[in-house]
Image (tube, grey):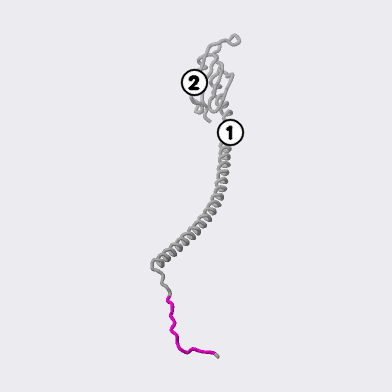
Amino acid sequence: MIKINLLELKREVKQKKKLPKFLVTWGAITGTCLLLAALGYFGMEWHLSNMKAEKKQNEQEIASLKKKIDEVQKFERMNKDFEQKVTLIENLRKNQSAPVMLLDELSTILTTADGVWLTSLNYSGDAVTTDGFSYSNETLVTFVDALKKSPKVTDVNLVESSRTTQDNVTVYKFKLTCRFKV
């Protein structure tokens, strides 16, 4: 037979032990610190990844700009070469007619100074060096004065004048320098 006890037994209910307050406080502080450390760590990781992406983007932009700078420098070199060539062509064109103009001017002046003839003529840049002979000092002076009056001839200097004999004739050998303006 089965016995059933219908009487109520007093049972003791075990109460849970309360944790001491310092452990709760210490656990809360530790948990908060761990949470803040985790947030700081993940925040720094996120910031670092953003900085790396920005660095990579800046490096690509720098590479692109370097290519453009190289192209601009190449263009500037080509432009400078072109300008030098144009200047050279203009100077050649300008100086191309200078010897003809110089000879024309000298032939005009020589027709007025009868008895003067030239043996050499050097023309470099705008400097002219001339050697020649004259029958007399007066004709040489007339020639030099005519050169000085010419608007295209400047800085006329009689460097040397000496009396000499050429084919049993007394002549004056001279050397003069001047500048010729184109």
Q: Residue at x 52, y 54 (%)?
A: 52
Query: What are the residue bounds of the magenta stretch?
Result: 2-15
User: The N terminus is located in which quarter?
Assistant: bottom right
Q: Viewer-proximal residue, 94 or 52?
A: 52
Residue 3 among those drawn in magenta: yes
Q: Residue furthest bottom?
A: 1
Give residue 157's mark.
Answer: 2
Residue that numbered label 1 is attached to: 92
At x 38% / y 68%, what residue is drawn? Answer: 21
Viewer-nearest of labels 1 and 2?
A: 1
Residue located farthest toward the right when viewing the structure as drawn: 167
Task: Work out whether 32 lies above or below 66.
Answer: below
Viewer-nearest residue: 46 or 11: 11
Q: Main secondary structure of the magenta part?
A: loop
Which residue is depicted at the point 49% across and 28% down? Answer: 151
Q: Where 61 falls versus 90 (above or below)?
A: below
* Point 43% across, 80% down: residue: 12
Q: Is residue 77 left or right of residue 155?
A: right
